[in-house]
Structures are given as C-alpha cells and as structure tokens.
Amino acid sequence: METTKQNEIHVHIDAAEVREGMPDYDQATLCPQCGGVTETSFGLAGGGFGIYSFCPSCGIVVSKSEVDE
C-alpha cells in the first residue's frame, strides 16, 4: 500500500509548558535540521497550547507561541 502526503498524520505529544529554548512562532522559518519548508498547526506540540510550526519531513517542532486559555 502506497502512502501519499495527503494520508500522512503527524501526532505531537508534549508537556503542559512550552519547552525551554523553543523559539517564538515564526511562519517563515525553515527547518534547522533539514532545511525543509515548515507547516503551521495549533495544539500541544512544543509544549503548552498554541500555534506552532513543524517540519513534516523530520517531524520536529521548530517554533511555538502559547495562548492563554
């Protein structure tokens, strides 16, 4: 069975607080690990609850901004 990008699901599980050293959310950031184009999402990835960017190739969270509940 061949998987296409449309069928991929990324699940990020993280702490209740934003990780120490995590840069503030930046939509224009490229992945520091592979140089790939990042995508934007909203949730708990990177710690805390808010908007974040992640690399779909590497699966790492690149930047995060937490929002108050």
Image (cartoon, grey):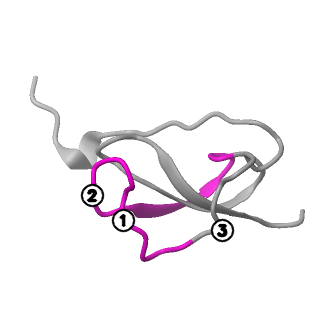
Q: Is residue 34 above or below residue 53?
A: above
Amino acid identity at mark 1: Leu
Left or right of 20: which side holds 11?
A: left
Q: Mark 3 or mark 1, which has the lower sequence index? A: 3
| Placement of the N terminus among the 4 image quadrants | top left
The reply to whether the C-beta atoms of the residues labelled 3 and 1 are less than 8 Å apart is: no
Q: Residue at x 75, y 47 (%)?
A: 20
Relative height, residue 23 to residue 5 (above, below): below
Mark 3 vs mark 2, CA separation in Å: 18 Å
Q: Give the Cα separation between the discs numbered 3 and 1.
A: 14 Å
Mark closest to the chain's N terminus, 1 or 2: 1
Q: Amino acid at mark 3?
A: Asp
Residue placed most toward the observer, 26 or 43: 26
**Is 7 situated above or below 21?**
above
Q: Secondary structure at mark 3?
A: loop
Horizontal relation, residue 51 to residue 40: left or right: right
Amino acid marked by disc 2: Gly
Residue beneath label 1, please?
A: 30
- Magenta residues span 26-46
Looking at this view, is 68 or 7 the one in front? 68
Q: What secondary structure predominates along the stretch shown in magenta? A: loop
Q: Looking at the rendered structure, which numbered label has been put on residue 2?
A: none
Tag 1 secondary structure: loop
Identify residue for label 2. 36
Label 2 residue SS: loop
Whole-percent x, y for residue 69 in the image? 90, 62
Binning the other alpha carbons within 10 Å of mark 1 as few (below 14), some (14 to 19) or many (20 upward) gives some
Residue 25, x across and y down, in percent: 60, 69
Give the residue number, with chain letter if any, for mark 3. Answer: 24
Mark 1 and mark 2: span between their CA atoms? 6 Å
- Across and down, in percent, residue 24 comes to 66, 68
